[in-house]
């Protein structure tokens, strides 16, 4: 191969690299902005603080995640509490926390040690505040379909098929 030919190949090679670079740069600029965290609460600061105390006492975090955190030592397949207010209202939650056997209200397929414990021995005020707080955990609309899917699959172990309710 003569020097002139080599030169052409080098120029072509560099041009291809530049084109790939430009394309890559354009693509990276065109990607959707990160939509952000889809969960929020409508609770007051006071209720949030009160709920944090109650949830610490009830060790909810050893089984459930909330705001993306839970105790990493545990691997209980409990549903995340984020967005729970979309699925359950305050009255339902109050009854659920007050039940001697929560599984009478929400059946389970899990081993006894993994199941939702009864909080019937908590003070009535704590159960009320807890229900109010959990009901205040909301989720942005765009994220709902995904949340439903995860929740369904976690609870049932089956694949979720979208329905139009
Ligand atoms: C030992 C693990 C464990 C602890 C501790 C626990 N949960 Fe649960 N929870 C579960 C599991 C598992 C379920 C799913 C139902 C079942 O299997 O009994 C559940 C279900 C629920 C549900 C209903 C979810 C739905 O789909 O409607 C709510 C609400 C809830 N828990 C809130 C709490 C709160 C609040 C606390 C703390 C005060 C708490 N849980 C403590 C394991 C736990």
Image (spheres, rainbow, N blue to C red):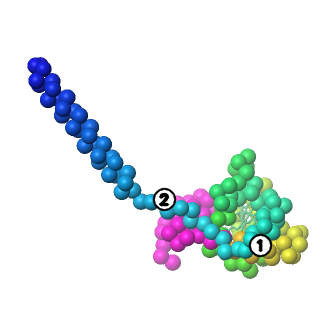
Q: Which residue is mark 1?
A: 47
Q: Residue furthest bottom?
A: 91
Residue 50 is situated, as x and y percent measured from the top left of the image, at 81, 69
| Label 1 crowd (10 A; few <14 / some 14-19 / many >=20) | some
**Image quadrant assignment for residue 58:** bottom right
Numbered range of the magenta stretch: 137-165
Mark 1 lies within 8 Å of ligand 1 (Cβ measured): no
Residue 53 in the image: above or below residue 92? above
Q: Is residue 44 visible?
A: yes
Q: Inspect the magenta stretch and tell me whether residue 86 lies in it.
A: no
Name which residue lies at 67% across and 74% down: 42
Mark 2 lies within 8 Å of ligand 1 (Cβ measured): no
Q: Which residue is mark 2?
A: 34
Residue 27 in the figure: left or right of residue 106: left
**Image quadrant assignment for residue 20:** top left
Q: Nearer the viewer, residue 130 or 78?
A: 130
Q: Nearer the viewer, residue 136 or 19?
A: 19
Residue 147 in the figure: left or right of residue 115: left
């Amino acid at each position: 191969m003569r020097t002139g030919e080599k030169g052409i190949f080098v120029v072509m090679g560099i041009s291809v690299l530049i084109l790939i670079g430009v394309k890559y740069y354009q693509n990276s600029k065109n990607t959707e902005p990160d939509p952000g965290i889809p969960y929020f609460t409508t609770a007051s600061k006071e209720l949030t603080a009160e709920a944090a105390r109650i949830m610490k006492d009830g060790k909810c975090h050893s089984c459930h995640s909330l705001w993306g955190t839970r105790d990493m030592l545990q691997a209980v397949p409990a549903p995340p509490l984020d967005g729970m207010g979309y699925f359950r209202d305050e009255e339902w939650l109050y009854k659920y926390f007050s039940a001697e056997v929560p599984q009478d209200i929400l059946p389970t397929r899990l081993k006894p040690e993994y199941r939702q414990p009864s909080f019937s021995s908590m003070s009535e005020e704590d159960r009320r505040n807890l229900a109010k707080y959990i009901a205040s955990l909301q989720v942005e609309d765009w994220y709902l379909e995904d949340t439903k899917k995860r929740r369904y699959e976690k609870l049932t172990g089956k694949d979720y098929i979208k329905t139009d309710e």
